[in-house]
Image: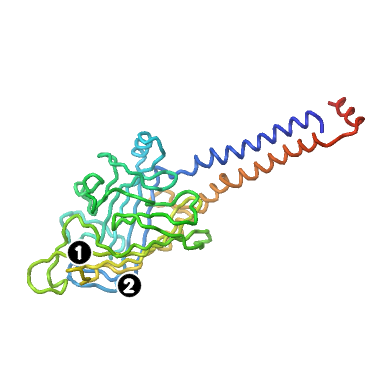
Amino acid sequence: MGNRSRVLMIALGIFFVGIAALAKFYAYPTLAVAPADQVAHTVSTGPDATIFSVADLAEKKGVTLEARRTVRGDVKAAQDISKKLNRDVVVFDTAVVTDDEPNYQFPDDKTDTSKLPLSFVQERVVLDAHTGEAVRWTDAETGEYISTSLEKADRKTAENGGDEFFRGHEGLVLKFPFGTEKKEYKFWDSTTRKAFPIKYKGEDKLQGLPVYVFEQEVPKQEIPLAKPLMVPAKVVGETGDAAVEVKRSYQNTRTLWIEPVTGAIIKGQEKQLASLEFNGEPRATATEVTIAYDDATVKKNVKGAKENGVEEGGYQAKASQLNLIGFWVPLVSLIIGLLLLALVAASALRPQPVATRARREESD
């Protein structure tokens, strides 16, 4: 091998090793960030559910519940908070409305309580853009909050929510880390305002996409309420005309199917049981349902689809792109670079006849 060829191979070897390092330690971390402008909609359905009918003051069986979640990123808040904390964060406003009326819409008259949904939770969360972990942020204007109504005055923050109702988000909330591992995490439960362990259970496939399955047990406990819950005595099997205060208990088995490269939740399912309790005993079923993402939501999360003109989901393609940049490009580039450098080293170390060496030096 002549000197010119050797120099060229050394240069190419260094180039490919550099490409490997650049892809692994710069390109991948730059791309493995939750988008601050993300918009997402999911629909979950729960057939054959039991609910408590406020109109009838009795349990209602065999209904189908529908839960619609909207997630919308606040880009400006994310930029401001990232700058102040000197770390990459994203800010999401989320709303989940659950009712037995398909595609429920809030009434124009907010005072018409008879047409309010069975359940409504609105939250603002601040998350680490890489890990999905909740970030404590209590700023009066952009801070995290949780509410069960549309009124801004009803929002509870970590400052005014109190320890029992809301101390601030914790654990994973809307996604898992990029490069999700087969281990236990802590995942947020909006009903109890707490994070509980969620354990890796195995692998699965959804629409041909490999996913990790995680399961969380939320043990039975009292649900924090912003105001005392009063019901007629007969609802809980008591006599008299006066209203009595009841507690609301809740337990849940949550299963999540996670695309591990992006950490995206492809499918979610919950087995919920909530009861109205009086004197420490369950007296009526408030909600009993197994509710999960519908097929259209799962397909959108895997393949991608437009909703209201905005592209959502498509995590199969996103995972492939990240896997290419974070694994295959660094691996192949490193192998090529090391092979070229090894060939140069082997050529230099190989003894050559004097005549051959002289001819090659003349040709150079």
Q: Dot 2 corresponds to which residue?
A: 48
Extreme-left residue of the structure:
241
Q: Is residue 293 visible?
A: no
x, y percent for residue 71: 35, 50
Q: Nearer the viewer, residue 11 or 184?
A: 184
> Image check: 122 left or right of 130?
left
Q: Residues within 10 Å of mark 2 (few under 14, many from 20)?
A: some
- Above or below, 305 relative to 47: above
Q: Residues within 10 Å of mark 1 (few under 14, many from 20)?
A: many
Q: Dot 1 corresponds to which residue?
A: 247
The three-letter code of the residue at mark 1 reads: Lys
Q: Quadrant of the C terminus?
A: top right
Going 32% across and 64% down the picture, which residue do you hit? 219
The quadrant holding residue 85 is top left
> Image check: 207 left or right of 334?
left
Going 41% across and 39% down the picture, which residue do you hit? 88
Q: Is residue 318 visible?
A: yes
Q: Quadrant of the N terminus?
A: top right
Q: Nearer the viewer, residue 50 or 203?
A: 203
- Above or below, 337 relative to 304: above
CA separation, marks 2 and 1?
Answer: 25 Å
- Above or below, 159 relative to 353: below
Going 68% across and 43% down the picture, which residue do you hit? 335
- Above or below, 95 relative to 251: above
x, y percent for residue 113: 17, 59
| Local secondary structure at mark 2 | strand
Q: Nearer the viewer, residue 302 or 238?
A: 238
x, y percent for residue 228: 16, 59
